[in-house]
Amino acid sequence: MTSILIKNGFVIDPVQGIRGDKMDIAINDGKIVKNLSNPDKTIDASGMVVMAGGVDIHSHVAGAKVNVGRTFRPEDKLQSTYAPYHGIRHMAGGTSVPTVFKTAYMYADMGYTTVIEAAMPPLYARHTHEEMRDTPIIDEAALPMFGNNWFVLDYLKRGEMDNAAAYIAWLLRSTKGYGIKCVNPGGTEAWAWGLNCLSIDDPVPYFDITPRQIVSGLMEVNEYLHLPHSLHLHSNNLGNPGNYTTTLDTLKLSEGIKPNNNFGREQVLHHTHIQFHSYGGTTWADFESKGKEVMDYINSHPAVTCDIGFVTLDETTTMTGDGPFEYHLNKLNHLKWANTDVELECGSGIVPYVYSKDVYVCGVQWSIGLEMALLAKDHMRCYLTTDHPNAGPFWRYPRIMKWLMSEKARNDVLATMKNEDKVRDRSTLGSIDRELTLYEIAQMTRAGPAKALGLGSSVGGLVPGMQADIAVYPYNPETESDPEKIEWAFSHAKYLIKSGEVILNDGEVVSNGNKKTYWVDVKTTPNRQVERDIDQTFVKYYTVNKNNYEVNEHEFMKNPCVVQIDAIQ
Amino acid sequence: MNTVTITIKKQPDLFLEADCFTPDALAGKKADEIAELPVFIGKTVEKIGDYFTVSGETGPTADETRLVFNGDFTKVKYIGAKMSTGEVVLNGDADMYVGSWMSGGKITVNGSVGHFAATAMSGGELNITGNAGNYLGAAYRGDWRGMSKGKITVAGNVGSDCATFMTGGEIEIGGNVDVHVMTHADGGKVIIHGNAKSRLGGQATRGEIYLFGTVDVMMPGYVKAGETELTIGGTKAVFTIYDGDQGERHPTRKGLPIYAKLYLKK
Amino acid sequence: MSKRLTDIICPFCGTLCDDIEVEVSDDGKQILEVYNSCAIGSEKFLHAQSPDRITRPRMKQEDGSWKETTYEEAAKYTAKILCDAKKPLMYGWSSTSCEAQSTGHMIAEQVGGVLDNTATVCHGSTLIAMQDVGIPSCTLGEVKNRADRIIFWGCNPAHAHPRHMSRYSIYSRGYFTGKGSKSRKIIVVDPRPTDSASLADEYIQVEQGRDYELLSALRAALRGAQLPDKVSGVTKEKIYEIVDILKGGRFVVIFFGMGVTHSLGKNHNIDMAIALTADLNNYTKASIIAMRGHYNVTGSGQVLGWQFGFPFCVDLSRGFARYNPGETSSNDLLMRGEVDGCLVVGSDPGSHFPIASVKKIHDIPTVCIDPHTTPTTAVSTCHVPVAIVGIEVGGSCYRMDNVPIESRKVVDPPAGMLTDAEFLGLVLKEVNHIKGVAE
Ligand SMILES: [Zn+2]
């Protein structure tokens, strides 16, 4: 492997507290090293920003529902240029739901090297892995969904934590999953009968359990298993006016639970796309932001992290494991609706959506995301996402950075809205003059999410010994004042290095890289009852045999990277 | 207005894609420059001049440019596709995608065209003296935004799936039309002087169909709502009005549902 | 001593049964008996053993006779015709693994091929309908565990998907459906009284080609609208009665097949059936599932989807992907004379395409990769026999409800035979060589 020296860049690394000092970064054998003599390659980064490769904690980039989004929207391919096949670069198309190739190239252009697929239906795990295997460059991991799983509902209802833990460990191993995702706890199982759970005390039909018990139980099991990541939660009542009370009720469930892991993770609950969960009002007519109320809670509770799910005001494709939400969204916009309920496990829905800046609700949603990120006190606990592609496509991250870093850029958008006054009236965004620094952006986009994922010792920073994932952006923080330049520079990384290999050289893709896939293998105390339950349930209720359920690591993963944990009590 | 004449001199072995046969792409170019522009046959890139003779001169802008095509263009796709202004006259028959995605200007075809003409048209005029194939003025696959503006006139017959997902504009058909007219439409108008096969206005929420001839099988979701005398396409007649498609969701105005309307000449 | 292999996947239909047991000889070379499978599935396993099987590639000579060649020569020939063609059609992919499909796609990217699968003559209309209105659906286990109203519309599982009824639908017993068929009402809609119709609680004899109107009438009735006395040959009283049966269920599922995908209006019939399903969700829970034919046609749509963004009819000729059935669909391309070279993998257009298309396949250089001799191999210039996926080599496949299942190897292929993924790998190498691309 080549050794590389990146000279003279403005280095920003929150892990080491480096705030734009002019420094050299040395790379050898795939890792960052202290120093280097006679590098094989030298990159002159003078006048440019150097950061660790970006880490996306929540994005829908691979798997069954993403592919429905692709195949049922041929028109999405016409919304942007379909980039032709060129040298080592595969043809790459799609707009809100790009193909696997375009996904990789666009993340690379933004300087991102690690992406978490946020919702893997266990029965469809093999599909998710096949797509991740075919996605070049970026390192990935996938989170299987547990919040509506029949085993989990049964064990948690009866308070059988050991059994729940043994089952979850088995499922992570079978699906090659990375952590515990929970989407609309209980609500998606209710949706299998056309119903929903909108508060944390709504009972799940036939299962005699509430979302409250599911969320608390999963947090407890997560720490029992010492997993690298915490419970990753999309709570009940997403997207509805007045849902912030459900959100606060849910967040409070984390109180009293202590993180228990060897990965440097400090939170016990990661709440995803919090923007969609911070709505006041009672209908769309009196809809308003409660972003401040929710962010106040998060600011004062260090065991909670969040990502925002910024609305980018684009035409996009919404897709979530929250089946009933997509059904109701389709009732609002009457565009096409896909839904897949997955036996014994979960479900999902997909609906195209146009966030128009001239629709005041969309304007307010846009405001809430920015408002919350600007009110956050600790950006090591508040991350940049669009819940891709739900609130907007991931390739808009640089535009969001611009909005976060420039009050003028925000006001420019507000000024073009048809309902500017009404939008300003419904959130506090207009009164916030805070402009985030590149340091805070680096916290939100690499150091913070890496730590929350339990990957903080290897990615998200530039400490010698860490994996050499490094992005160089053509942006000079000392001289640049035009906010447009932020958006441009962070969409056009000049160099990208992944695991020590040059991926982008002078902005050109020169390698499809050597992507890897993380998964978690937890050893638990042998549990005969759970083994018996699994055997019987497969025979009686599943439509695939248990022996055909496990994802074969050798066939379906590229460079599997196993995180081994011993949770034997 | 300046005129450039493009005459076919050699038929391609397979089909030829001429994305640049629009006033927008050719304006400001000399005949010999045009002859050098690329056209595509499968994966091969060839020159306009290999298959066509080009004479005359374009205007400085597309607005002032008229393209005249002479000959048999039945193996040529995309004539007038995506044009926004100017004029195209085609003396002969053409293959698929004539005037697809056009947003302005005028196309006159003295002949017939293939499938997918005027896909997702959003403005301008398309006049065809012969017949048109399937998917005339329809949406692209998967799109809920079909033809939204502009006017299409076909003197002859039209194939199936005409005006799918139409939201506005007008199509007038002199002859007969095959199955599925204005399926999923949410606006716009289609006038049929000849006969229709079944499936007029299936799943339509808004829009109007005027039929002078007969229809094989009516959609069950259209109910009689009176009759009226109208002058349509220059012809005065009494029409029976039907409201539909009752199977579909309908928007309301002042508390009353708005329906797509089917006018059948009595 | 023989051994019994369990949890084997049947590489026949989209039901993709994964509970097959196969008895093989001690040396692992011979299949002795097949258990649990339907008659067609058994036949597929046992046929693999036919002694007259062709085991080496062969080229057609001037006089129409075949001459044996090597895999290397066949790969060279395949690469050459794909590179020489201005617009090669690369058709099939439905009876092979996702791994082979993926290798084929990488070839297509370089040679500017059009990738199309058997959906083009089967459930392509379903895919088009999904693109227009979406699809509320579920996995087959949801049907097994919950469904109490099942409609089979224009499909005859008793013949085409023999184990569907016992594994997933009519007779299966699940968590909320412990009484099996007694917990369910079965409705069959078909112009002909099929064997499946004889199992139904309600059989609706729809007029041939009038499914769209009948589905529309069901939707109108669901909204309480007035109907004409008869629609598509069915009385309005019957239509209201069916609507009541559906509304009265807790979980409705509609299965549909070729009877609606290829009758008048094609995709519009499915579109309307999907719309009916979506409407039913205003009253109860409802899902709809296509009865996909070939065991991995679904997988082909998936891999094309994630790599290029479209599920079939994918035209890569200009160096980027385009899609428009009616133009980029195999039969339109063949009959209009838009393609000048052809590769067929894992399907038999010689049996399933109209005669005009088959003639065209005969007239252009065509390589057919198929374990067996078929009507397609007869009109090809080169036949490359390969190991049978799901019997002699494993690989990823997708069930009709998109559930991915890894098929298994049961016995060795005859000595020296390649798999289609391996052969396509050789072709890719040759293409790289011709194009001067580093691997
Ligand atoms: Zn999400």
Image (spheres, rainbow, N blue to C red):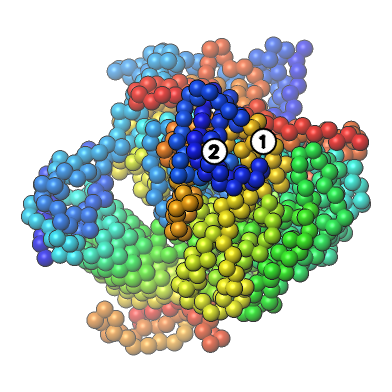
Same chain for labels 2 and 1? Say yes or no. yes
User: Residue A332 or A510: which is nearer the viewer?
Assistant: A510
Specify whether B167 is left or right of C270. Answer: left
- Residue C136 x, y percent position in the rendering: 62, 57
Specify whether A245 is left or right of C194. Answer: right
Q: Residue at x 49, y 81 (%)?
A: B258
Chain designation of label 2: A
- Residue A442 x, y percent position in the rendering: 60, 49
Q: Residue at x 61, y 38 (%)?
A: A462
Q: Earlier in the sequence, mark 2 or mark 1?
A: 2
Specify whether B82 is left or right of C42. Answer: left
Is any part of residue A26 visible from this angle?
Answer: yes
- Residue C39 x, y percent position in the rendering: 65, 32
User: Residue A45 or B153: which is nearer the viewer?
Assistant: A45
**Image quadrant in which the C terminus of chain A is located:** top right
Residue kind at label 1, given as amino acid type: Ser
Give above or below for A536 relative to A368: above
* Cα distance in 3D space between marks 2 and 1: 20 Å
The residue beneath circle 1 is A458
Q: Residue at x 57, y 55 (%)?
A: A437
Give above or below for C389 relative to A427: above
Give above or below for A357 relative to C143: below
- Residue C345 x, y percent position in the rendering: 47, 30
Residue kind at label 2, given as amino acid type: Met
Residue A23's tag is 2
Q: Residue at x 16, y 43 (%)?
A: B36
